[in-house]
Image: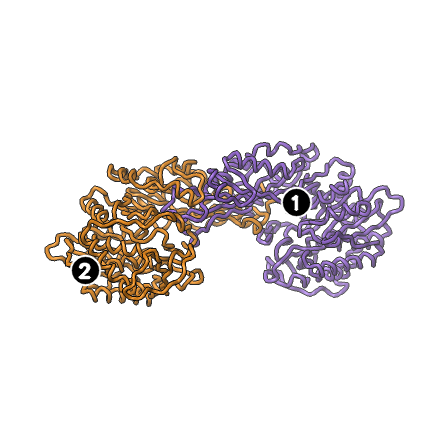
Chain colours: A orange, B purple
Amino acid sequence: MKRRILLLSVFAAGLAAQSFTPTNPSALAARRWREQHERVIVDEFVTLLAIPNIAADRANIQRNAETIVAMMQKRGIASQLVSVPGGNPVIFGEMKTPGASRTIVFYAHYDGQPLDPKEWATPPFTPTLRDKQLDRDGQVIPLPAPGRPFNPEWRLYARGAADDKAPIIALLAAVDAIRAAGLKSKSNIKFAFEGEEEAGSANLEKTLAANKELFAGDLWLMCDGPLHQTRRQLIAFGARGGVRVDVTVFGARGELHSGHYGNWAPNPALLLAKLLASMKDDNGRVLVEHFYDDVEPLSTTEKRALAEAPDIDSDLMHEFWLGATEGGGKKLTELITLPSLNIRGMASSRIGNQASNVIPASATATMDVRLVKGMDPQRTAQRVIDHIRKQGFFVVDQEPGAEVRMAHPKVARVASSGGEAATRTPMDLPISQEVIRVVESARGPAVKLPNMGGGLPLVSVERPLGTHTIVISIGNHDNNQHSYNENLRLQNLWDGIELMAALLSM
Amino acid sequence: MKRRILLLSVFAAGLAAQSFTPTNPSALAARRWREQHERVIVDEFVTLLAIPNIAADRANIQRNAETIVAMMQKRGIASQLVSVPGGNPVIFGEMKTPGASRTIVFYAHYDGQPLDPKEWATPPFTPTLRDKQLDRDGQVIPLPAPGRPFNPEWRLYARGAADDKAPIIALLAAVDAIRAAGLKSKSNIKFAFEGEEEAGSANLEKTLAANKELFAGDLWLMCDGPLHQTRRQLIAFGARGGVRVDVTVFGARGELHSGHYGNWAPNPALLLAKLLASMKDDNGRVLVEHFYDDVEPLSTTEKRALAEAPDIDSDLMHEFWLGATEGGGKKLTELITLPSLNIRGMASSRIGNQASNVIPASATATMDVRLVKGMDPQRTAQRVIDHIRKQGFFVVDQEPGAEVRMAHPKVARVASSGGEAATRTPMDLPISQEVIRVVESARGPAVKLPNMGGGLPLVSVERPLGTHTIVISIGNHDNNQHSYNENLRLQNLWDGIELMAALLSM
């Protein structure tokens, strides 16, 4: 269902690929290696992309996992599949470094978003090279002959090309490059590749909790998500959490004729409208009492990072056809460090020419609340429910019957689900600062955000293992992830290999 | 689409059939006639109900019209079909009374609501007798042998049984009864049976305007609609008008990820909620400026009639499972003499498990405004549009493009359609008072309302002909009109024959 989300297909239209020459020796070694092995790297990528990877397709998930394990073992990386009953396997791999005192774990996921093949220009599991973006009339081209270079603006189309098999291939190529150059890591390295991130990571925490020693590390680098819209490297030190709230308010037990009963029978669509309107002011500030109470303030370093982040707000407004934004003038990068309350959808009876001359029987809104560090999902959901009560609603958690509805002027059914807390790794930590230095030595000045606006299963890692997480991305921002025609720009893979080589050498 | 409307199937469960002995000689004559001709009357009814009567089905509409004309001509009633290009025929009939100085026109319609046969317990055009209501486990029974009486609580199931072929059959039987008794009318009598009322009476006004002399009358008795829920006779002296207003408000040009952009990109569902919330206060009073300015106040007689109308509000609340009503304690019968603003439906993106983690791209509400006498549909729609502007929206009447949307913080597309004015015939008119006397002499104390809450094509009659209209009903209130399993309780037909006989003799 996420495929309708507007994608930034034309946002960075004018941007040239950044040409940054790494100062990091491993990144430089990776560049040399890649220039000589482009076809081999792409062939390995194509092999992996050709295996369907929807989380619910257990047989193919297993094939993916075994293929990746074989790729790791070919390189002598000790690896195994780890799972809990009912869960897809997490691929574990390890490269020990004698004398190293710390361990860095590289996370990626090999499953992909569910899809409808009919929406794809070419089959999602037939990796297809195009000479440019499909939206710009990109044509299908064959892989170049071995030894011939790839144009870095070419794109490889397949489910998982960007989200999130690319980091796996980049890591494996980076391992080859480092070894070929005789370079070494300063840390122990572990790999953890999940097989059901797009299905909600339902078993990740359980799997890690059951295998704490195996997955222990001083830092998890979460290799997922796209670069910043400016094509600069993005380092996000956290993610927002979230909790979903569904509200249904009720009118009569069935639809009523709006002529016979209009302005006598209460209209649940209006009741819902008034309730929703009470939740936010015109600047988008949430009016639910105590909503912001537990928000952990940003540190000086985090505030500075926000101030340094590129201001793309007016470009985004143009891209999205917006004449205004919420937040009283605050920038997007700052606003996503605050919690949000969003109406995902709203419905009551029918609209337009499908509408009848009725007073609807009920009205429903599905909302998501995005949380930031310090906020508890259940407590926040309870505050929303308290707010609904304060608006005069009798709140129930099941479909209310006649007695309940006749006993109260306003009745709302409220259900909250899917609570996940937010995390934010302090940017001031020595290891955070080291990651920034290493990333920038490989990729140039990075955009550093205290947290992403969206969610990632960071808590599922931090909670069982007591570790820190930092999100590192390599995909192009216009990769159509979660949609049809997902693709990776080859330059992003090349850059990703250099980035991973630098991080593997930390 | 009207079939989902909640029906009053059990409201009058405890009511016994009223046994009122008419004081009106024509009504008494009709009772005697009916008691001797029940089977013949029902046979004629069944013949008519067996002809499908959906307005769009032109061939069958023609068959209906010709069948009714034949029934009239068999009785020597001069009749003809009158139509305008593209319209279904209006059946015209006339019985002149020598020396009469006034003309009364009896209106009914022979078309029925569109339907889905799959929803019906028995085929809608196979008239089926049941020993009681289907909802009360009524079983199919054969017609009794000629000469054997019908149980008046039996019900005849077919599309049009109540709405609105019953008055046609009642009128024809009443004509037979009056003649058999040697009674006469004091007025010239005309009949006008429409063939597309359920399709919105699109051609009625045109047809009457093109044939003013033919259809001229001092009073049109609009024989349509059900009795009062208490089973008392209903006389409604008008109907509310209406105008539809569709509003769509816009966010980004597509759905946005609620994590990445939540509390930065404006949410159109919230904008719509705030807009709708601004339109009515918590008592249901419409806050649109000047909304009530043109409402023509009720006369003393009309107010008295309202005060005398039965108070069924608490019964209705129980029936509908309502814990409150709008209107600050005013009764339903009074509230429907005021204009209303009602949300028919509301939609934005998707809800529940269909919802995505998005900020919707747009949000739409379809509203209906019910008008009372004095209000102009277009002026009222304009006042709603002015209100939307006052809430800060730039209002357009077409899908707005990028430039418009980027130039304004809030943009709403608003379309109004289907405006029809309300009418209300003064209850003080001598002819109004005469109708009340005649009806009550045939049917006992009636419920008299200044207007119905819903709409009827009264303006389409009054405007071209400069006449008055009064609405007289005969169907049971629980007739499932506009829904599946429409039915007529036989006692209502018997009573209707007596009522029509009395009115034909006016």
Q: Looking at the image, how many numbered discs can be counted on the residues?
A: 2
| Secondary element at image label 1 | loop
Q: Is residue A291 left or right of residue B380?
A: left
Q: Secondary structure at mark 2?
A: strand
Q: Choose between A368 and A140: the one closer to the eye.
A: A140
Q: Where is residue B26? Give x, y as percent.
A: 81, 49
**Rendered location of residue A248, percent (x, y):** 46, 47
- The tag on residue B455 is 1
Neighbours of disc 2 within 10 Å: few (<14), some (14-19), many (20+): many
In the image, residue A397 lies at what x, y percent? 41, 49
Residue at the location (44% across, 47% down)? B360
Specify whether disc 1 shares its chain with disc 2: no
Residue A94: assigned label:
2
Q: Nearer the viewer, residue A384 or A7?
A: A7
Q: Residues within 10 Å of mark 1 (few under 14, many from 20)?
A: many
Mark nearest the camera among 1 and 2 is 2
Residue type at the position of mark 1: Gly
